[in-house]
Image (spheres, rainbow, N blue to C red):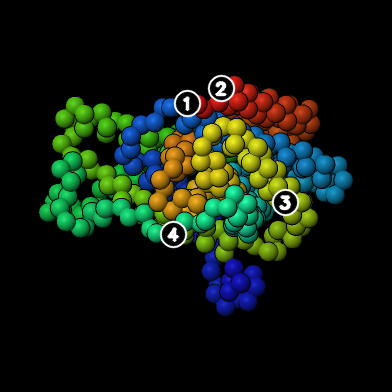
Amino acid sequence: MLLGPEVLGIVPFDQAILGNIVYHAMAIGFIALSLKSRTRETSPIVLKSGMLIVSVYMLQGIIGIVLTLIFMASLKPDLFVGFGLLLPLGYGQGPGQAFSMGSQWEKLGFQGGGNIGLTIATFGFLWAILIGIPFMNYHLKRHQLKAKADTLHRERSPYLAQSEPDELPLGDALDHLTPQIVLIGIVYLATYLSILFLDHLISPMGTFGKTFVTVLWGMQFNIAAGYAIIVRLIMDRWLKKGILKRDITNNYLLQRISGGVFDYMITAAIAAISISAVQQYWLPTVLMTTLGGVVTLYYLKFMVKRVYQKNTLENLMGFYGMLTGTISTGMALLRGTDPEFDTDAASNLVFGSAVGMAFGTPLLVIINIPIMGYVDGNTSLYGLTIGLLAGYLSLLVWLMLRRRQA
């Protein structure tokens, strides 16, 4: 960002291209994660992990829209109401989702929406790192624990020794990386064609159709991950029935693909921020992201020790890193307390994210409501949005606390 055209002007990169990298990398990374073979977890604690993730979305959404209405009534009357909804997207779901949705809202009047989404997500990374690490060290010291040595969790490389019986043989005509790329490409193509079909089907339906279509294009990574999960389930069934003789996916390579694209996504997200585009929003952005970071931290601290009866610090750091940054920052903070992933915290993050897609479906509808109100001038829909977010948050909290883990 410093070397780019916004500051020093040494590297004349195109911010629009960087934005596209962020948009597509988010989906590719989640497809790769969703295609990994794993033991299916259906325990109550995994369900509660999904509920916890979505409850943070709801809480961040309430903070965002309430503050936006306050800003609209005082500091910035012309502020787009979707500004506040970028908080759960940027913090809870990452820069890809925030940029994607902000860019789509630009068509409805949100000037610089994509860049604002990237900026909010970047503040989330700062909260995850600059606040998360001292917070973790404080609790390690307070409980007289030592940070475990950060020894790498070694995974079996597919290029060492012989291939496993259930994998493609190393001597096969195709390189192991090729099937992974092909599967990811097929899933992403199916995602694109599906959203394109729905776009043509729903767009003519007036204001609701136009605003809902922008949400669909913005939520493409959720839809892509859903398709990838379906492909994974079909492959597991075919392997069990003998239709597939060997598993064509490779967890090691899929993890490397997702990790690589997420790293590029984070870098592109920060570099693509347009300082001039966000100057007019700097005060609302700083106030909202600060309050969002503080409330997220203390809400998770309160809930994690009630939902998880063991490994509370590991789960707290993992969820906090993920719900202010991405799953990559969540795993990075988790390594500080559990470098070998010996506890259940890592699986709670991964499986909880998958379950969270189902619990998070109502957000697709709720996020549409204030945008419709803004376009139509119906401000009563703003109050309805807050009520729905608060009601769903209350339901999720009640379900999580109703019966604690034994």
Residue situated in front as seen by the camera: 133 or 1: 133
Q: Which mark is residue 403?
A: 2
- Alpha carbon separation for disc pair 3 and 1: 33 Å
* Callout 3–callout 1 Cβ contact below 8 Å: no
Give the mark nearer the N terminus: 3 vs 2.
Answer: 3
The amino acid on which the numbered mark 4 sits, given as a three-letter code, is Asp
Mark nearer the viewer, 4 or 3: 4
> Which residue does the numbered mark 1 point to in the structure image?
44
Give the mark nearer the N terminus: 2 vs 1.
Answer: 1
Q: Which mark is residue 75?
A: none
- Alpha carbon separation for disc pair 1 and 4: 30 Å
> Which residue does the numbered mark 4 point to in the structure image?
150
* Callout 2–callout 1 Cβ contact below 8 Å: yes
Give the mark nearer the N terminus: 4 vs 3.
Answer: 4
Residue situated in front as seen by the camera: 309 or 10: 309
Quadrant housing the N terminus:
bottom right
> Which residue does the numbered mark 3 point to in the structure image?
290
* Residue in the picture at 19% in, 27% down: 241
* Callout 4–callout 3 Cβ contact below 8 Å: no
- Alpha carbon separation for disc pair 4 and 3: 30 Å
* Residue in the picture at 85% in, 49% down: 75
* Residue in the picture at 47% in, 56% down: 148
The amino acid on which the numbered mark 3 sits, given as a three-letter code, is Thr
Q: Residue furthest top?
A: 402
Number of numbered tags placed on the structure image: 4
Circle 2 — which element? Answer: loop
Q: Crowdedness of circle 2 by 10 Å Cα count: few (<14), some, many (20+)?
A: few
Q: Residue 117, how many percent across, how many down?
A: 63, 51
